Amino acid sequence: MLGELSTSEIESVLANNVVGRLGVQADGKVYIVPVTYVYAGGAIYGHTTEGLKIDLLRKNPQCCFEVDEIQTIADWQSIMAWGRFEELQGVEAADALEKISAKLLPMFPGETSHPSRMGPTSSGRTSTQSGNSIVYRIVLTEKTGRYER
């Protein structure tokens, strides 16, 4: 059965996940990229470094955000949301990084994991752990959700 998710179900999917897809558009390009995030107070919080995503968002801060929970091909929930990108500075950025760290750090591999199984590290990407991190918020203005069960 296909259907629409309720507001509380949409909020739950957004709050319970940490990977979504950010869709941006500027300069005649549409760019969709997976990002880690934290959802709080009606906004998506994340961090990244300079690159195409940030270049496009600075030119056009209107964006969309999508999250899926897929159990099987016939048992899934999908959220689509629209909002506005904002770069955070100072206390707002520090507060956002605290939220991000509290949710995501427990998910990082421990001493007993095997980093070699996690895939190659890009030599062209600057670490978001360093001082050049950009902290952002996407204030969501519209949300919709669908499911199949």
Image (cartoon, grey):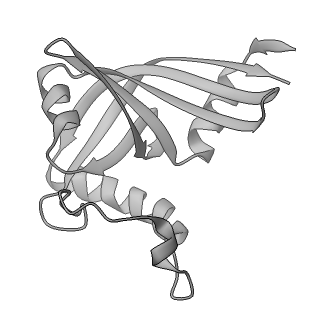
Q: Is residue 20 visible?
A: yes
Q: Is residue 34 left or right of residue 91?
A: right
Name the one closer to the observer, 55 or 7: 55
Q: Is residue 41 visible?
A: no
Q: Is residue 102 left or right of residue 13?
A: left
139 to 19, vertically: above or below: above
27 to 17, vertically: above or below: above
Q: Is residue 5 left or right of residue 58?
A: right
Residue 88 at what x, y percent from top left? Answer: 19, 44
- Name the quarter where the N terminus is drawn: top right
- Name the quarter where the C terminus is drawn: top right
18 to 83, vertically: above or below: below
- What residue do we see at 37% from left, 44% from top? 45
- Label count reads 0
Residue 32 at what x, y percent from top left? Answer: 36, 28
24 to 122, vertically: above or below: above
Q: Is residue 66 left or right of residue 26?
A: right
Name the one closer to the observer, 126 or 144: 126
Residue 121 found in image quarter:
bottom left
- What residue do we see at 18% from left, 19% from top? 60
Residue 57 at what x, y percent from top left? Answer: 20, 28
Residue 77 found in image quarter:
top right
Residue 122 found in image quarter:
bottom left
Residue 15 at what x, y percent from top left? Answer: 58, 42
- What residue do we see at 25% from left, 50% from top? 48
